[in-house]
Amino acid sequence: MSALTLCLIIFGAMLVLMAIRVPIAVAMFAAGTLGYLMQTGWGPYSSFLNNLAFARFASYDLSVIPLFILMGHFATQGGISKALFQFAASVMGRFKGGLAMAAVLASAAFGSICGSSVATAA
């Protein structure tokens, strides 16, 4: 079977799955899995799944997400977030647009505590 024929069959199967109201993510996963299995067979696919699970979850990028959530929980329970926002509101509250400026100031202060202003904005 040529690669083009295989691609058309898999794409058609994905469209059929979407037409019968299977969620798009599941339809795309099933089509990708079926295509990979038809190209390589079960052995390489099994090895790919074993290596993929470890490689994805052992990366630094994903390990910091739970720690960032934990830091946010500590800040909320400890009252740091509320205190930072109250301070920023007391400093900027009297100006026009003071609430927006207070939110930006509190976010900047929390970003300096966490070490990542981009992650604080998220």
Image: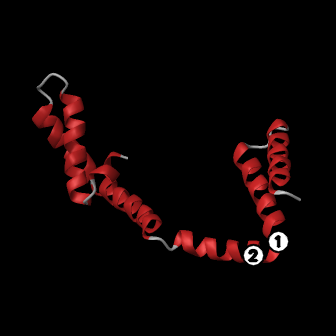
* Horizontal side of residue 39 vs 64, given as left or right: right
The circle drawn on residue 78 is none
* Horizontal side of residue 71 vs 111, given as left or right: right
Q: Residue at x 27, y 51 (%)?
A: 117
Give the alpha-carbon distance from disc 1 to disc 2, as whole Å: 6 Å
- Dot 2: within a 10 Å radius of its alpha carbon, few (fewer than 14), some, or many (20 or more) residues? few
Choose top left, top right, bottom left or bottom right for residue 50: bottom right
Q: Nearer the viewer, residue 103 or 50?
A: 50
Q: Residue at x 15, y 42 (%)?
A: 87
Secondary-structure class at tag 2:
helix
Evaluate if marks 1 and 2 touch, with contact meaning CB atoms under 8 Å apart: yes
* Horizontal side of residue 107 vs 54, given as left or right: left
Image coordinates of residue 11 in percent, x first then y, are: 79, 46
30, above or below 11, in the image: below
Residue at mark 2: 44
Q: Nearer the viewer, residue 57 or 30?
A: 30
The N terminus sits in image quarter: bottom right
Q: Amino acid at mark 1?
A: Gly
Q: Amino acid at mark 2?
A: Pro
Residue at mark 1: 41
Q: Residue furthest top?
A: 96
- Dot 1: within a 10 Å radius of its alpha carbon, few (fewer than 14), some, or many (20 or more) residues? few
Secondary-structure class at tag 1:
loop
Image coordinates of residue 84 in percent, x first then y, are: 20, 47
Q: Residue at x 19, y 41 (%)?
A: 105
Image coordinates of residue 52 in percent, x first then y, are: 62, 71
Image coordinates of residue 30 in percent, x first then y, are: 78, 54
Q: Nearer the viewer, residue 3 or 90?
A: 3
